[in-house]
Image (cartoon, rainbow, N blue to C red):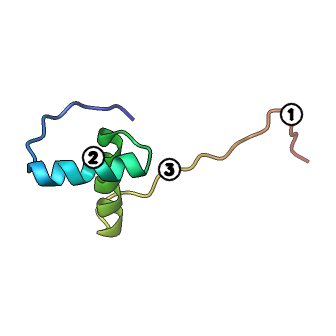
């Protein structure tokens, strides 16, 4: 998935709270904002579930 830069104007109190939260979770502020947005999209049903690809063992031969 490609990342795209986006300038964000945000209330200073919200930014400070997000920074504290990201510090608690050992994430960067950017990663925390993306995590919160992704979680909100998932909970609202506005995002697709992540694609999970099967792991195929090249040494496993069909019977």
Of the two numbered discs 3 and 2 in the rendering, the one whose residue sits closer to the viewer: 2
Residue at which label 1 appears: 59
Q: Is residue 49 above or below residue 1?
A: below
Where in the figure is residue 7, as x and y percent of width and height?
Answer: 13, 34
What residue sits 44% from the left and 58% below the top? 49
Q: Tell how many labels.
A: 3
**Does residue 51 appear to the left or right of 63 in the view shown?**
left
Direction right: furthest residue: 63
Residue at which label 2 appears: 19
What residue sits 8% from the left and 42% below the top? 9
Mark sitting earlier along the chain (3/1): 3
Q: What is the spatial separation of the Cα atoms under label 3 and label 2, in whole angstroms? A: 30 Å
Q: What is the spatial separation of the Cα atoms under label 3 and label 1, in whole angstroms? A: 24 Å
In the figure, residue 14 lies in which quadrant? bottom left
**Which numbered tag is attached to residue 25?**
none
Q: Please state, as top left, top right, bottom left or bottom right, where the N terminus lies in the image.
A: top left
Where in the figure is residue 35, as x and y percent of width and height?
Answer: 36, 51
**Which numbered tag is attached to residue 51?**
3
Crowdedness of circle 2 by 10 Å Cα count: few (<14), some, many (20+)?
Answer: some
**Does residue 18 appear to the left or right of 10 in the view shown?**
right
Mark sitting earlier along the chain (1/2): 2
Crowdedness of circle 3 by 10 Å Cα count: few (<14), some, many (20+)?
Answer: few
Mark sitting earlier along the chain (3/2): 2
SS type, badge 1 = loop
What residue sits 37% from the left and 46% below the top? 23
Where in the figure is residue 16, as x and y percent of width and height?
Answer: 20, 49
What residue sits 88% from the left and 39% below the top? 61
Of the two numbered discs 1 and 2 in the rendering, the one whose residue sits closer to the viewer: 2
Where in the figure is residue 48, as x and y percent of width and height?
Answer: 38, 57
SS type, badge 3 = loop
């Amino acid at each position: 998935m490609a990342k795209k830069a986006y300038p964000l104007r945000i209330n200073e109190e919200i930014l400070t709270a997000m920074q504290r939260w990201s510090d608690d979770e050992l994430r960067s502020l950017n990663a925390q904002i993306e995590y919160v947005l992704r979680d909100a999209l998932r909970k609202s049903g506005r995002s697709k579930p992540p694609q999970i690809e099967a792991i195929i063992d090249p040494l496993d031969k069909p019977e």
